[in-house]
Image: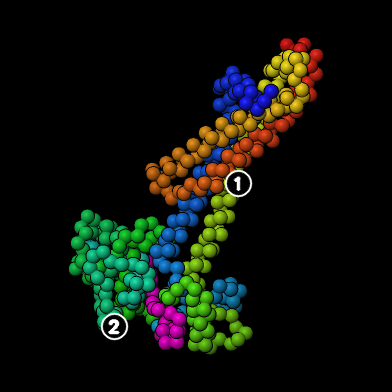
């Protein structure tokens, strides 16, 4: 019996009990679809974060007070605070940077009429627009003169505009209250959508205004440094580290009490975490494939028992043991193959449904389709071996007598 004939006989035998066939394939269908869906969710989340980081710029360094070494932080007590002195030191001495932008931010209340919302207030300089890739769609940014004079002017995010002004898009010139201080809106930021830190739920004001008029501090939460090219990131990071160590008078044996990180570091770290999470989710989903394999073995053992007389007849007319083994193994593979195809269709459809109706970020990876289908076939072979072996070991005479 050749392969095509074996497939034909296998399909005929399986279709003899369609309901049992569908129930047997359910484990494989669910397993394959779950693997594809989980991987597509993980890949979609990874792509979304990568796009957000790309929007911010990959040639950005973030300098924050405080060491990455937890033991150092415990030994040193409270972490240090940056002020404009550190910002000015980097601006004066760093030769490998394009711009240096200080930031101070705090989450606070803002009002317009009877409408109240809470958003992140960012005190910074006008270069924020260019360095952070945060352009305005209406109005303009404040100026260095506004910052020096501590003017009460603000650029608001799209979510803040919606929460305070509703459908009114022309809000430039309107006054709002931020922490009981009146501010004039001079610009509205271009919407960025969902992302880290809810980038549309922000209000940007001059740094001096935020420090002196709103929060009563001279601290700077972080320093954003733009480097001309990504090839210069490592060298620029080392230069900034050397400048700050000298300015903060750290001894050679002392650890840094600040951290310099690049957007590429964030991208790499998140990529590794996302890969681990995706693998974990796919592994959990793959358990369904094993359950499906057990279902195949169970139904094939039942089939061997039901077709004992048929097996005896085939052996009596010349079928060899390997022919019997091959026939039952083909049936198991057909179940796994059809279940795998249906699982792929369900997984792809489920991923599109999550993206369309639940607004989740998904990305169907071709390798996840091939991988899940391959494992479905392998499981069909593995769990079909024992029933096939048992069928081939039946005694022809006893099989012919079986009722």
Say which of 60 and 323 sits in front: 323
Q: Is residue 313 above or below residue 326?
A: above
Residue matched to label 2: 148
Residue 64 makes an appearance in the image:
no
Within the image, what quadrant is residue 7 found in? Answer: top right
Helix or strand or loop: what does disc 2 sit on?
helix
Helix or strand or loop: what does disc 1 sit on?
helix
Residue 356: give x, y in percent of width and height.
39, 44
The quarter in which the C terminus is drawn is: top right
Residue at x 39% of width, y 78% of height: 99
Q: Which residues are magenta?
A: 85-108
Say which of 275 and 115 sits in front: 275
Residue at x 31% of width, y 76% of height: 126
Say which of 34 and 387 sits in front: 387
Residue 124: give x, y in percent of width and height.
35, 75
**Is residue 159 on the magenta stretch?**
no
Q: Is residue 36 left or right of residue 13?
A: left
The quarter in which the N terminus is drawn is: top right
Residue at x 77% of width, y 11% of height: 401
Residue 24 makes an appearance in the image:
yes
Within the image, what quadrant is residue 31 found in? Answer: top right
**Is residue 101 on the magenta stretch?**
yes
Crowd band around label 2 with a 10 angstrom C-alpha radius: few (<14), some (14–19), many (20+)? few
Residue at x 52% of width, y 46% of height: 366
Within the image, what quadrant is residue 293 found in? Answer: top right
Q: Residue furthest front?
A: 2
Residue 109: give x, y in percent of width and height.
32, 65
Q: Earlier in the sequence, mark 2 or mark 1?
A: 2
The span from disc 2 to disc 1 (Cα, nearest Å) is: 57 Å
Residue matched to label 1: 283
């Amino acid at each position: 019996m050749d392969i095509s004939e074996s497939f034909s006989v296998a399909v005929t035998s399986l279709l003899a009990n369609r309901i049992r066939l569908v129930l047997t394939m359910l484990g494989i269908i669910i397993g394959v679809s779950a693997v594809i869906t989980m991987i597509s969710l993980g890949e979609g989340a990874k792509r979304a974060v990568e796009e957000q980081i790309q929007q911010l710029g990959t040639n950005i360094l973030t300098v924050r007070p405080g060491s990455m070494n937890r033991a150092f932080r415990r030994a040193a007590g409270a972490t240090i605070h940056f002020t404009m002195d550190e910002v000015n030191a980097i601006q004066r001495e760093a030769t490998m940077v394009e711009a240096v932008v200080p930031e101070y931010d705090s989450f606070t209340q803002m009002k317009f009429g009877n409408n109240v919302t809470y958003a992140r207030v960012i005190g910074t300089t006008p270069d924020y627009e260019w360095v952070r890739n945060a352009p305005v769609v209406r109005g303009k940014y404040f100026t260095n003169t506004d910052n020096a004079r501590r003017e009460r002017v603000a650029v608001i995010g799209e979510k803040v505009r919606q929460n305070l002004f509703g459908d009114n898009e022309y809000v430039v010139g309107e006054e709002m209250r931020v922490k009981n201080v009146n501010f004039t809106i001079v610009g509205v930021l271009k919407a960025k959508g969902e992302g880290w830190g809810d980038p549309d739920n922000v209000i940007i004001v001059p740094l001096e205004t935020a420090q002196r008029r709103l929060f009563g501090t001279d601290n700077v939460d972080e320093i954003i440094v733009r480097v001309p090219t990504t090839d210069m990131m490592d060298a620029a990071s080392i230069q900034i580290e050397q400048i700050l160590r000298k300015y903060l008078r750290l001894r050679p044996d002392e650890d840094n009490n600040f951290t310099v990180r690049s957007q590429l570091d964030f991208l790499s770290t998140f990529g590794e975490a996302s890969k681990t999470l995706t693998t974990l989710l796919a592994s959990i989903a793959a358990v369904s494939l094993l359950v499906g394999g057990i279902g195949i073995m169970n139904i094939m053992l039942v089939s061997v028992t039901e077709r004992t007389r048929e097996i005896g007849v085939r052996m009596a007319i010349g079928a060899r043991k390997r022919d019997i083994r091959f026939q039952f193994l083909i049936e198991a593979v057909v179940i796994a193959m059809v279940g795998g195809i249906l699982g792929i269709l369900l997984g792809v459809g489920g991923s599109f449904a999550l993206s369309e109706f639940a607004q989740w970020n998904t990305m169907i990876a071709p390798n996840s389709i091939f991988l899940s289908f391959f494992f479905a076939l392998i499981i069909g072979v593995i769990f079909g071996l024992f029933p096939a072996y048992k069928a081939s070991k039946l005694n022809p005479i006893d099989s012919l007598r079986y009722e």
